[in-house]
Every structure is written in C-alpha cells, then in structure tokens.
Amino acid sequence: MNAASPDVLAASDEVRAALDSGAPIVALESSLIAQGLPPPLNLETALAAEAAVREEGAVPATTAIDAGRILVGLSQDALERLADPGARASKAASRDIGPLLARRALASTTVSATLRIAHWAGIELFATGGIGGVHRGAGHSFDISSDIDELAATPVAVVSSGAKSILDLPATVELLETRRVPVVGIGTNELPGFLAASAGLPLGHWVSTPVEAAHLIGLHRAIPGAGAILFMQAPPAELALDRAQLELWVEDALAEAESAGVHGGAVTPFVLQRLAASSGGASLRTNVGLIVNNARMAARIAVARKGESTGA
C-alpha cells in the first residue's frame, strides 16, 4: 500500500498481500451493492464480479467506508451489511469521504470515491458498470457528476460500459474531451450505450485485446499530469437492450422522477428501478451482466499489465 497512506486506509489481508507482492488487483465500487441493485441481486452481483476477477488471476478489491476507516477489500460480512437495506448505508462520492470518516458511518463508494481510494491504495485498474456524467438539462440545473472531474484528476484505468443511459451522452463525451480524459473502446469504435450496445457516437480510439489495453495504460501513465484513462466495452451481446426502446423507457422514467420531485443523487436509482419494471427485468439482467463482464475484462488487463512489467 502507498507508504504515505494513514491508518484510515485499511486493506484486507488478501489485498495487502497483493499490493506487497505486486500481484494484479482490480478495484470494485460498492454503490451498486447498497444503492444500485435490489436484494438479493446486489450481493449476488458483487460476489460474481469478485469471482470473475479471481478466475482471471487477479485480486478483487471492493471498497467501502465503515467505522472511521476506508476498507479496500471487503469481507463477506461487510458485503452482506452493505447489501442489507436495513443498514441504511450512505452513498459516498469523493467529496464525501472525509465527512463520512468523521461520522464513522457505513457508506458505499461511487465511481469517484472508488477512483480516489484505488489511487490512494496504489491500485491502477478499476471496473464498474457505468460512469456518471452530464445529466439531461444540465444547462439549467448544473447537474454534472463528480465522476468527470475525478477522472480528469486521478491516474487510474477504468473499465466501464459507458455513461449511464439516463445522461446526456453527447454532452458527457464532450466534457470528457474538455477535461482531457481519453475514452478508448475495447473491441468497438462506438460509444457503448451502457444497457445498449451502442449510443451511436463514434470513438476516436480503440483497442482489440487486453494486452493492447495494458500497453496503452503504461504509455498514458508515463505522461506527466495524466489523469484516468477510460476504457469502454459494450454489454454482452445477448443481453444488450434495443437503443430506441431503451430511450423511450428512460424518457418515461425521467418524467416520472420529475413529477415525483426526485432530484440529485436519488435520480439514478429511481430511474434504474423504473427501467427494471418497464423492461420486465431485462435491464437488471443487462446491468448485472455488464458489471461482471467489465470486472473480468479489467482483471485480464491487470494480468497483462503485470506480464508487461515483468517481461513475461
């Protein structure tokens, strides 16, 4: 672990051993457990993502906050607590880490918080489902996820399936460009639409294999002042939703959220819940599938990075 890290950053024995030995590690966020998916699917998905990372030869490091400590690598008990709605876990973006530590609260970590924690711990690969970005109507509301600024500032490689479907995707791509975050497709030259295979937006950069991605990470990290590099791969083809139908469901769900007075960080879980109902559960199956798929890809890249560094 980073020698400058204070005692507040607590790694599990498995993660600490991997950090000490230089073994490949993949950070995983936990807001999908506490806020993103319903039980028991939330815990099942978290365990499946961790299992996928291990199957590919890397160590999973799911992050959370509890009792005044940042946890890097969670026990079964900690995962179960986060998955329990009765635990009422808070949702931590990077700005919330200090206050939640001071409160000694139980909290899940979003993309921005996990990015910062991963870098702090010395982990360079992070897998998630979808990133946050520019919300629709942000020209009036100024509602833009802190994920964007954290990606610009924090040198961690992220594997996702694009920005969440409820966002203004063209504006999100433009802002990522403005903030100097390279967006690279994995096996695609189009922006994935999170739950859909494509958002219909071209990508300027792409790679075909984990080895190519690993090589690109090394080059990017060598650039002074570089922040994150954002890899995007489409959801599994057999699970991807139709883009036009998904957009109709999203528009209906956003209108319902507006009518119900749902705003800020509550919008995403609200809309995802409505999407699950509208799609007969198909959106949940796609979400779970892409989360596990991204964890697996990140592990493959992490293992390739290890091989590149050792010349294997």
Image (cartoon, helix red, strand yellow):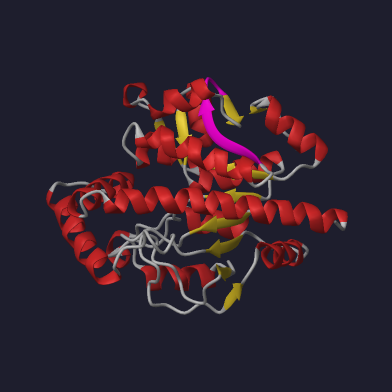
Q: How many marks?
A: 0
- Of residues 124 and 177, the one nearer the viewer is 124
Position of 105 relative to 231 (above/below): above
Res. 29 in view: no
Say above or below: 133 vs 35. below
Q: Looking at the picture, how far across and down is residue 290, in whole percent?
A: 44, 54
Q: Which residues are magenta?
A: 59-68
Q: Magenta region's main secondary structure? A: strand
Residue at x 65%, y 47% (from the top left corner): 56
Along the horizontal axis of the image, is 50 left or right of 308? left
Q: In the rendered structure, does residue 60 fall within the stretch colored magenta?
A: yes
Residue 181 lies in what quarter of the image?
bottom right
Q: Is residue 88 visible?
A: yes
Q: Residue furthest left?
A: 259
Q: Position of residue 25 (x, y in %)?
A: 68, 43
Front residue of this view, candidates 269 and 6: 269
| Residue 114: quarter of image | top right
* Towards the viewer: 143 or 72: 72
